[in-house]
Image (spheres, rainbow, N blue to C red):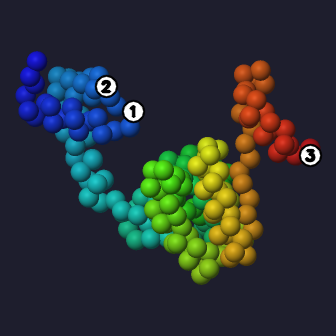
Amino acid sequence: MRQPARLEALLEALRCLPGVGAKSAQRMAFHLLSRDRAGGLRLAEALRAALEGLGECERCRNFAEEALCPLCADPRRDAELLCVVEQPADVLALEQAGEYRGLYFVLHGRLSPLDGIGPEELGLDRLAARLAQTPPRELILATGTTVEGEATAHHVAELAREAGVAVSRIAYGVPLGGELDLVDSHTLSLALNQRKAL
């Protein structure tokens, strides 16, 4: 069945989102058109405002409306700690945990030569310049445990060591409240190898 051209364009536009296939796009579009046109207009305006008004922080590469994001502009943050993360969502997760008071550097991905993502795409030249200009006391690696995440962590650790900066890696292991029989063997192995004395 042939759909109106504007509906087809909406369905195609929604499918650019990760995890949204044809059926999900159809459900979203039909909901907005049938039940929540005002919500659809708010979504369109918020999306337009974000796309036009958000850029990258010149220091950490997180999303920002000004030259510096609110975290980099905050003088209360500990500039002696620098946490390297893969995505802006990782910054949000760490901030919500409430324990970290240092600064960040956002890679917007991880090394993946097969996908054409090398050090340049991750801004590692900017990270190296930052480490040379204002070296922190410690660089904390908070990349994922995928093969690409580990390769990225290794590469960033080498940059930090060349700059004379101490490097640490966030710990991995059994989740709080987790049952050991439900945890995979690789995670248990990491937890055992990274244990600490009490």
Q: On the rendered structure, is 65 left or right of 69?
A: left
Q: Nearer the viewer, residue 22 or 196?
A: 22
- Marks 1 and 3, how far apart at CA: 42 Å
Of residues 3 and 30, the one drawn nearer to the viewer in this rendering:
3
Q: Is residue 93 visible?
A: yes
* Element type where label 3 sits in the image: loop
Q: Which residue type carries mark 1?
A: Gly
Q: Check the image and name the residue furthest to the bottom.
A: 133
Q: Nearer the viewer, residue 136 or 99?
A: 136
Coordinates of residue 4 in the picture (x, y in percent) = 7, 28
**Residue 156 place in picture, x, y as percent:** 63, 63
The residue under label 3 is 197
Kindly report the distance in space between the C-alpha atoms of the residues bearing marks 2 and 1: 9 Å
Judge the density around disc 3: few (<14), some (14-19), many (≥20) Cα neighbours within 10 Å: few
Q: Which residue is mark 1?
A: 19
- For the point 60% across and 67% down, the residue is 76
Q: Is residue 145 left or right of residue 63?
A: right
Residue corresponding to mark 2: 24
Circles 2 and 1 in contact, beta carbons < 8 Å: yes
Q: Is residue 60 visible?
A: no
